[in-house]
Image (cartoon, rainbow, N blue to C red):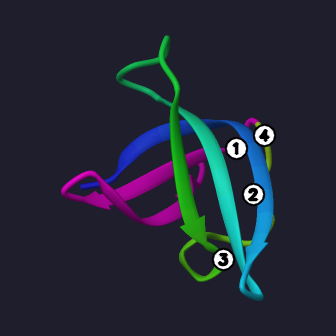
Amino acid sequence: MAREAIIRQVNRYDLHGVAYYRLVVSYSDEPDSVQEVRISHDSIYGEPADGDRILVEAILNVVTEVRKKTSE
């Protein structure tokens, strides 16, 4: 099940020619704390930005996908 979060900071970087993102996020159920997420470009939507509301999928606390939350 995905966890809702807000992106606080985004940094894009390349590692051996592959684009990755380092995100600092606050999960909705823990708004006063931040956590770091690192994910490759093919597991996240295009052009993530500070302030985006997202859904974070993880298996055993390893992030596998980040999706932009759509309006409900």
Q: Secondary structure at mark 4?
A: loop
Question: Residue 39 in the image: x percent, y percent?
Answer: 55, 65
Assign a secondary structure to mark 3: helix
Q: Return the residue at label 1.
A: 52
Residue that carries the numbered disc 4 in the rendered image: 50
Q: CA distance from mark 1 to mark 4?
A: 6 Å
Bounds of the magenta segment: 51-72
Vertical placement of residue 13 versus 49, above or below: below
* Tag shown at residue 48: 2
Question: Going 55% across and 57% down the picture, which residue do you hit?
Answer: 38
Q: Which callout, 1 or 3, points at the residue further toward the start of the chain? A: 3
Amino acid type at circle 3 is His
Circles 2 and 1: CB atoms closer than 8 Å: yes
Q: Position of residue 53 (x, y in %)?
A: 61, 42
Secondary structure under tag 2 reads: loop
- Up/down of 31 relative to 10, above or below: above
In the image, what residue occupies the spot 47% across and 52% down?
55
